[in-house]
Image (tube, rainbow, N blue to C red):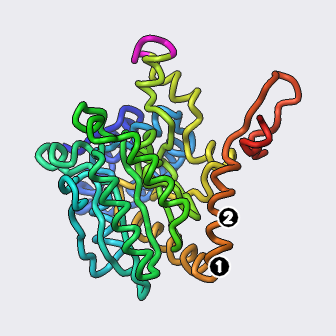
């Protein structure tokens, strides 16, 4: 049975009615008009629901078990993928996939989180939560791309970096900071896309790019709603309230200037049409790569650095607050 989100129940009920009516109309041509009307009603219902998702609804869509993952986009949007394994130090982290690929005629390095499709894969991939060796692998492959002057494309989909003892012993926080530093000065174009969950340092560890985009129903946050609720309200029961307070949806972050673009999803979410979603991503990558490949490298690096220095708004009083669209650098607040 297909996984159903709570707010999608009316959609599935209408789809069931439509399926029954379509079967009946095969032997009753006079019902075809009713079928067309019901299809239009279903389309309007999907549009109405997905245009008015709450922040928590967005989290549910981003975590949908059938939502396309990095492996799906490698199949649908790229050609000739050749996977590269290991960090030459500890091991191969399956939570991050890396390798060469082609986008049309452009050769690129693709780096992306992988959650897994079934329970066995999810355990092998740590549910998309990378260990230090995953970020070391990503750094090494980025430097390889830099050596051959090839763009880097990062697909982000993680609840956060793996929080276990072993990961901490092997320098989880340090390697994420190092990854951010290396990306900030990598002499090749970088495009980052949040395709599902963009959680905390696990996301930003491969999230420093010349362009940062999000899928329409993804989220990008310093902490999960459950983690935020546990800290502020001492209970995960307040996760919906925390989700609203975090302002982490694509619409919010585009208004704040945290991301550069929102990539539209098929009506009903990416999980309803992975191929169409891959086509939308490929179209965005084509346009953006053409733009970035024409920018001088020194200019690209300077713009990338300043982009992340300007992120965020700082308020020291409740009066004369700057609008969310204003960007204030850290130096302006000291």
Measure how far apart labels 1 and 2 are at the Cα level. Answer: 10 Å
Q: Which mark is residue 303?
A: 2
User: In front: 250, or 126?
Assistant: 126
Q: Secondary structure at mark 2?
A: helix
Look at the image and say whether residue 266 sits in the magenta stretch: no
Which picture quadrant has residue 300? bottom right
Residue 198 visible: yes
Is 59 in front, or is 230?
Answer: 230
Which quarter of the picture shows residue 3?
top left
Foreground pick, 167 / 327: 167
Q: Position of residue 313 (x, y in %)?
A: 72, 38
Count of numbered labels shown in the rendering: 2
Q: Which residues are magenta?
A: 232-237
SS for dot 1 = loop
- Name the residue: 33% across, 41% down: 171
The residue indicated by pointer 1 is 295
Q: Does the CB distance between marks 1 and 2 fall below 8 Å?
A: yes
Where residue 40 sits in the image (x, y, percent)? 48, 55
**Residue at horizontal 41%, vertical 53%?**
156
- Tell me the quadrant of the picture where the N terminus can be found: top left
**Residue 219, placed above or below residue 287:** above
Report crowding for label 2: few under 14, some 14 to 19, many 20 or more residues within 10 A (C-alpha).
few
What's the residue at 22%, 56% (across, down)? 89
The earlier-in-sequence mark between 1 and 2 is 1
Q: Position of residue 285 (x, y in %)?
A: 50, 72
Identify the residue shown where x is 67% and y is 46%. Answer: 311
Q: Residue furthest right?
A: 320
Q: Check disc 1: other Cα within 10 Å, few if <14, some if 14-19, many if 20+.
A: few
Q: Residue furthest top?
A: 234
Residue 30 visible in the snapshot? no
With respect to residue 36, does 317 lie above or below?
above
């Amino acid at each position: 049975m297909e996984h159903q989100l709570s707010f999608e129940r009316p959609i599935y009920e209408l789809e069931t009615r439509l399926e029954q009516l379509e079967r009946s109309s095969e032997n009753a041509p006079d019902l075809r008009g009713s079928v067309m009307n019901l299809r239009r009603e279903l389309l309007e219902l999907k549009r109405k629901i997905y245009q008015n998702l709450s922040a928590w609804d967005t989290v549910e869509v981003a975590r949908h078990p059938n939502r396309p993952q990095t492996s799906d986009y490698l199949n649908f949007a790229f050609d000739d993928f050749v996977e590269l394994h290991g960090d030459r130090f500890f091991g191969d982290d399956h939570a991050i996939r890396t390798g060469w690929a082609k986008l049309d005629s452009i050769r690129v390095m693709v780096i992306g989180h992988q959650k897994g499709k079934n329970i066995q894969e999810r355990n092998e991939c740590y549910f998309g939560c990378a260990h230090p060796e995953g970020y070391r692998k990503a750094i090494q492959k980025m430097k390889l791309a830099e050596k051959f002057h090839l763009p880097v494309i990062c697909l982000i989909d993680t609840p956060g970096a793996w929080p276990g003892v072993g990961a901490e012993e092997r320098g989880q926080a340090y390697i994420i900071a190092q990854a951010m530093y290396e990306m900030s000065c990598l002499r090749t174009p970088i495009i980052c896309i949040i395709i599902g969950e963009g959680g905390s340092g696990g996301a930003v560890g491969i999230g420093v790019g010349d362009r940062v985009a999000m899928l329409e129903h993804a989220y990008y946050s310093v902490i999960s709603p459950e983690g935020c609720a546990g800290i502020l309200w001492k209970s995960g029961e307040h996760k919906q309230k925390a989700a609203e307070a975090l302002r982490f949806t694509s619409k919010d972050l585009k208004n704040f200037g945290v991301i550069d673009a929102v990539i539209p999803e098929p009506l009903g979410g990416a999980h309803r049409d992975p191929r169409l979603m891959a086509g939308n991503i490929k179209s965005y990558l084509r346009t953006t790569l053409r733009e970035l490949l024409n920018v001088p490298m020194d200019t690209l690096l300077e713009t990338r650095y300043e982009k992340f220095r300007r992120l965020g708004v700082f308020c020291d009083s409740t009066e004369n607050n700057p609008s969310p669209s204003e960007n204030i650098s850290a130096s302006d607040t000291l």
